[in-house]
Image (spheres, grey):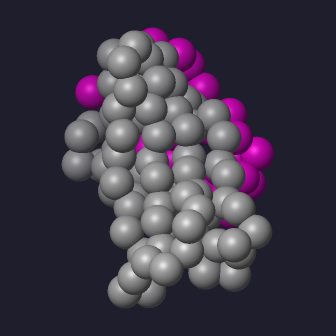
Amino acid sequence: MTDLTIEKEDRVGRHGRYVARIQGIDAEGEITFTHRGPKTISADHTGVPDDMAGHGVARALLDFMLADARESAFRIIPICPYVRKQYARHPEWADLFTTAPGEDPY
């Protein structure tokens, strides 16, 4: 989808989010995260408003987060039910996930 943009927003402290916007829709989808230790974040919540439903926003956000994890060499604790469910379906992502806060796998 060419009018979908995603960016990472780090907030002050340990929290941040990956945020998706679609041109012409006054809403934002997001995956919120928390820095849990060196090279580890937790994916806490995925939210996509009804106005953005059916556009593949949740999966695009997850794909963006996975690409960021590969590029920046961090691992993800899948707390969010959506992220956990997708991870269970994709064992090939195992190198990007962990269940140990603070684990430094690199």
Query: Residue 8: horizontal and vertical position, in percent?
Result: 35, 46
Residue furthest bottom as drawn: 2
Vertical comparison of 50 with 28: above or below: below
Query: Residue 90: horizontal and vertical position, in percent?
Result: 60, 62
How many numbered discs? 0
Residue at 47% x, 24% y: name it.
15
The image quadrant of residue 54 is bottom right
Residue at 27% x, 27% y: name it.
106
Residue at 37% x, 69% y: name it.
5
**On the rendered structure, is 3 left or right of 77?**
left
Residue closer to the observer: 26 or 60: 26
Residue furthest left as drawn: 71
Vertical comparison of 27 with 24: above or below: above
The image quadrant of residue 42 is top right
Vertical comparison of 37 with 5: above or below: above
Residue at 65% x, 49% y: name it.
46
- Per the rendered image, the range of residues in magenta is 78-106
Residue closer to the observer: 15 or 98: 15
**On the rendered structure, is 61 left or right of 68?**
right
Residue closer to the observer: 55 or 76: 55
Vertical comparison of 91 with 13: above or below: below
- Magenta region includes residue 42: no
- Magenta region includes residue 94: yes
**On the rendered structure, is 49 left or right of 67?**
right
Query: Residue 103: horizontal and vertical position, in percent?
Result: 43, 17
Residue 103 is at least partly visible in this image: no
For the N terminus, the quadrant is bottom left
